[in-house]
Amino acid sequence: MSVMVPDSSVVGASPAPPAPKVLGWYRAYAAAMALLYLGLDVGLVLAMVTGGIELTEVPVMVFGALMLVLCLALFALFAAALVLPPRPWVWIYHLVLITVGMTSACCLPACVALLVFWIKPEARAYFGRG
């Protein structure tokens, strides 16, 4: 069974739109957020192992475990954003990750700028959301 690759030289086929400039800025944002959450996970584990956080009370253990799982999940989400292909649903996935960053006052200015350019027609067209 052979896989047919569509040829863009076929009459009537439109070439893929060029990648918008905001995509490079978004990738830098996603990489920075992935590294941030990975660093938080590593720091939390180190604090637990070295005794920086004493796990003697149940609320501290529950909070530590919850933070560990949350940071690991957010790391995975932002890391996945770096390798996803341009598809209509991926545009929404990235949009959600931009809004996740808006929950932090430190990331808010960058996320607002990203959001302004992310919803422009060029970015939508690149992901097939015409």
Image (spheres, rainbow, N blue to C red):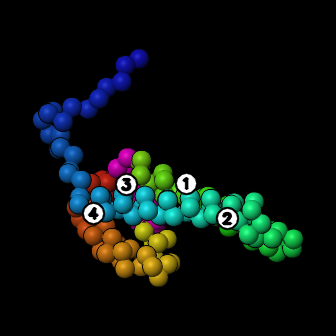
Residue 66 locus on image (x, y percent): 71, 66
Seen from the viewer's position, the closer of residues 49 and 112 is 49
How far is mark 2 from mark 3, CA to CA? 36 Å
Q: Which residues are magenta?
A: 85-97
Category of crowding for the residue at label 2, using alpha-carbon neighbours closer than 10 angstroms: few (below 14), some (14–19), many (at least 20): some
Seen from the viewer's position, the closer of residues 112 and 5 is 112
Residue 34 locus on image (x, y percent): 49, 59
Camera-near label (3 vs 1) is: 1
Q: Within the image, what quadrant is residue 4 found in?
A: top left
Residue that label 1 marks: 76
Q: Callout 1, which amino acid?
A: Ala
Category of crowding for the residue at label 3, using alpha-carbon neighbours closer than 10 angstroms: few (below 14), some (14–19), many (at least 20): some
- Dominant secondary structure (helix, strand or loop) of the stretch shown in magenta: helix
Q: Is residue 36 above or below residue 11?
A: below
Residue that label 4 marks: 22
Camera-near label (2 vs 3) is: 2
Q: Callout 3, which amino acid?
A: Pro
